[in-house]
Structures are given as C-alpha cells and as structure tokens.
Amino acid sequence: ENTTVVIVGAGVAGLALGNFLLRGGIDCVVLERHGREYVERRQRAGVVDSRAVRVFREWGLADRVVGGVPFEPVLNFRIDGETRPFEYMTDDHGDGRFCPQQVLVRNLVDVFVGDGGDLRFEAEDVRLENVTGPRPRVRYRDNAGVTRTIACDFIAGCDGDRGVSRASIPEEELTRHSHEYGYAWLTVLADAPANHQSMMAIHDRGFAGQFARGPQASRFYLQCPLDTSVEEWTDDRVWEEIEARFGEPVAVKGRISSKTLVPLRSVVHDPMSHGRLYLLGDAAHIVPPMSAKGMNLALHDADVFAAAVLKQVEEQDESLLAAYSTTCLKHVWNYQAFAAWFTDLMHDAGDASYHGHFRRHLARAEFDRLYSSATANHLFTEFLTGLN
Ligand code: RFL
C-alpha cells in the first residue's frame, strides 16, 4: 500500500491533521490503536480557544466540527471562600468555546469518515521503519489479525506521550526538557450541574476547580500530594474537600463516575521531527492541565504541519517542513511559559506546605495585580483566549 502521509493516533492532533490534509487533497491513512467507541468516549480537556477556532475556520471546518458553547468573558474565582470574579477588560473576547474533547473528537471522526477519509481503528503493534530514508514504511496488524505495510512520504506521530512514534527516535537525537510542579490533581467526573462554566478556588487546603461538562455534569480538580492514591479519596472525602476549598456547599452531589490522578508537569521534546517523522501534540509536549492548552497546542501543530505538507506536495517547496519544529517550538514555549506561570500562581497562592510562604506572598501579589492593572489583565486575557 502507498499513501502520502501515515498518521499514527486518532486523538485531537491526528484527527485534525487528517481532516486538514483531506481538505487539501492530500492522501493519508490514520492508524488508531483503540476502537472507535473508546476514542469517542475518552473524557479530557474542554477548552477550544480562539486561535484553534480560527484554524478550523480557515480549513473550512468550524461549523461542522466545533461544538459546545461560547466562553463567558469571566473567571469565577473563589479566594479563601469568597467570590472574586475576574472580568476581561478587553472588548475582544475572541470566540473560544467550551467544547468537551470527546465532542470535538466525535465530530472530527464523523467529518473525516463522512468525507471519505481512511481511518483504521484497532490497528495493533504499529511499527515505523526507515524513517530517515526517502520512503518510510509503517507496519501494523489490522483488526482481522493481518499484518499490513504502508509506504509513505511522511509519518505524523500523533500518538500521545506514550505512543510508539517518539519511542522510535534514538534517544540521543532528542532533548527532553521537563519540569515537575511537585503535586498532582485528583480529577473527578460527577453528575453535578455547575453554576458557572468554570470555578477555581485558591485555599489553604489547596487548589480546587470545577468545570461544566454539559448541563448535568462537572469535572472537578483537587490539588493533592504526589504520593496519594485514588483509594484514599472516598466519595465523601472528595465532596468534603470540594466544599471546604470552595467555601460553600455543593447543591447536587451526584454519582461520581471516575477518579484519576494526574501529576502536573511540563515536557518539551526538541526537535519535533526526525527524518520524515514529525511529532505533533502530546507526543512532542505536555502542558499542565491548569492552562487548558494541551488540546490547543495539538491543533496548532496540526495546522502548521498540514500547511507544510501542502506546500511540499503542491510546490515541491520543503521550506515549511524544514521549519516545522522551530515554528512549533516557538509557539509551544510561549504557551509553556504561560502554563507554568498560571499553574504556579493558582497553587502557590493556596497551600503553602508545598512551596512555602514566600512564594505564597508572591503568588497573591501577582493575583491581585490581575485586578489592579489593565496591562496585567490584558496579557492574561490574551493567553486565556488564545489571542496571543
Ligand atoms: P491524544 O488525545 O492522547 O491522542 C493520541 C492517540 O494515539 C493513540 N495511540 C496509538 N495509536 C496507534 N498506535 C499506537 N502505538 C498508539 N499509542 C497511542 C491513542 O489511543 C490516542 O487515540 O493526544 P493528542 O492528539 O496529542 O491530543 C492532546 C490532548 O489530548 C491533550 O493535550 C489533552 O487532553 C491534555 N489534557 C487536558 N488538556 C486540557 O487542555 N485540559 C484538561 O482538562 C486536560 N485534562 C488531559 C487531561 C490529559 C490527560 N491524560 C490522560 C494525558 C486529563 C488527562 C487524564
């Protein structure tokens, strides 16, 4: 079999890329390890920022792909149990959306398959061969157990942090930059309607967040030590901690359907390519979830890569592909800087047992500045909305 681009992984990055290439008339095959149902149900991020919406619009896909509801131009902070709304001081609030990741993924799958895209689920044991040669190959076992090989011009590694793509690159070819924040989030999905799109608490007991996931459900986040285990967090303890940190009762404490622990970290791999293999999204970089930028960075990579492949195929001009890693890393580090700042701010301002009282005072001063300085407000808003 032959194609132009083999895309490994049908997450946000892989599916967006597949759709962009299809719109551009470029042949591609998407290989996904899991089944369709699993991929479409996986609950994670919920914010599609203005830049990402613009990208979908430019590829002519926004109406069919981006769901959810527009951002409200306000963040509902609860500071030591008191409400302190943060309002954007700019007129341009962008057109970012609260769109659950699985809604975006489902739409991307529907549109790709509906437009004739080649998407193969349950592709096992994917292996990349000859990635530094002129014509790489991707080998996998299909859902009938048959081993298949696809030759291609380019491989797009969109298979996340633990995928096979980055693992295929010799270790000495990549530099891994990483930072651990020193705490984790317990992420909880519950049948509990939210009063606001988002609510975030700064409190002595640690950070807490609540984000609406449709009209009846919420995603809650609770800062916790790295060495905690999910078993230590009974439903009662979860609700008690949420109420304590927000400083108000939760009206409906519905069924909790999942609890997971996510250590907060930042990771960047440099460069984002090796031979004819290009890394996109989480395969190349991880931002802490506090920033809500993980999915948006993945979409940025997909946009840059698709445009680069088009330029190469249509004009035999390799310049955008050659610049792919540099172009993406510049953007990634800009948002990594925002993500680290916002993560430190929201956590250091609360529970001083992690990083001490000096950093608590600094974080509180920075937080107050968002309200007292229009300049600080504007910069924060730019990053939140993705207008930066
Ligand atoms: P994805 O979405 O993980 O997709 C990767 C796809 O590759 C497949 N795959 C393979 N396929 C074939 N062969 C292999 N060997 C394969 N190995 C893996 C996987 O099955 C999957 O379908 O990566 P992508 O496309 O780069 O998208 C990135 C975003 O998904 C990610 O940045 C965000 O979800 C991160 N994230 C969050 N981001 C936010 O902005 N806000 C959040 O609240 C938020 N919460 C989260 C998160 C990520 C989490 N995990 C598990 C990493 C919560 C969690 C738990």
Image: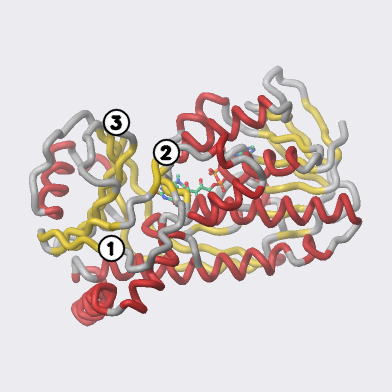
In the drawing, does residue 265 fall left or right of residue 149?
left
Pinpoint residue 123: horizontal percent, then vertical percent.
67, 29
In terms of sequence position, does the residue under pointer 2 or pointer 3 come before the other? 2
Mark 3: C-beta under 8 Å from nearest atom of ligand 1: no
For disc 3, the marked residue is: 257
Pinpoint residue 310: horizontal percent, then vertical percent.
80, 51
Between the residue at mark 1 and the residue at mark 3, the CA separation in whole angstroms equals 32 Å
Locate residue 357: give its quadrant. Answer: bottom left
Between the residue at mark 2 and the residue at mark 3, the CA separation in whole angstroms equals 21 Å
Q: State the residue in front, 163 or 85.
A: 85
Q: How crowded is mark 3: few (under 14 residues within 10 Å), some or many (20 or more)?
A: few
Task: Please say if the residues under marks 1 and 2 sit with CB atoms less than 8 Å apart.
Answer: no
> What's the residue at 64%, 67% (across, down)?
270
Q: Which amino acid does label 1 sit on?
A: Glu
For disc 1, the marked residue is: 87
Between the residue at mark 1 and the residue at mark 2, the CA separation in whole angstroms equals 21 Å
User: Would residue 224 be seen by someone viewing this image from the given angle?
Assistant: no
In terms of sequence position, does the residue under pointer 1 or pointer 2 come before the other? 2
Pinpoint residue 3: horizontal percent, then vertical percent.
84, 37
Tell me the quarter of the image containing the N terminus.
Answer: top right
For disc 2, the marked residue is: 68
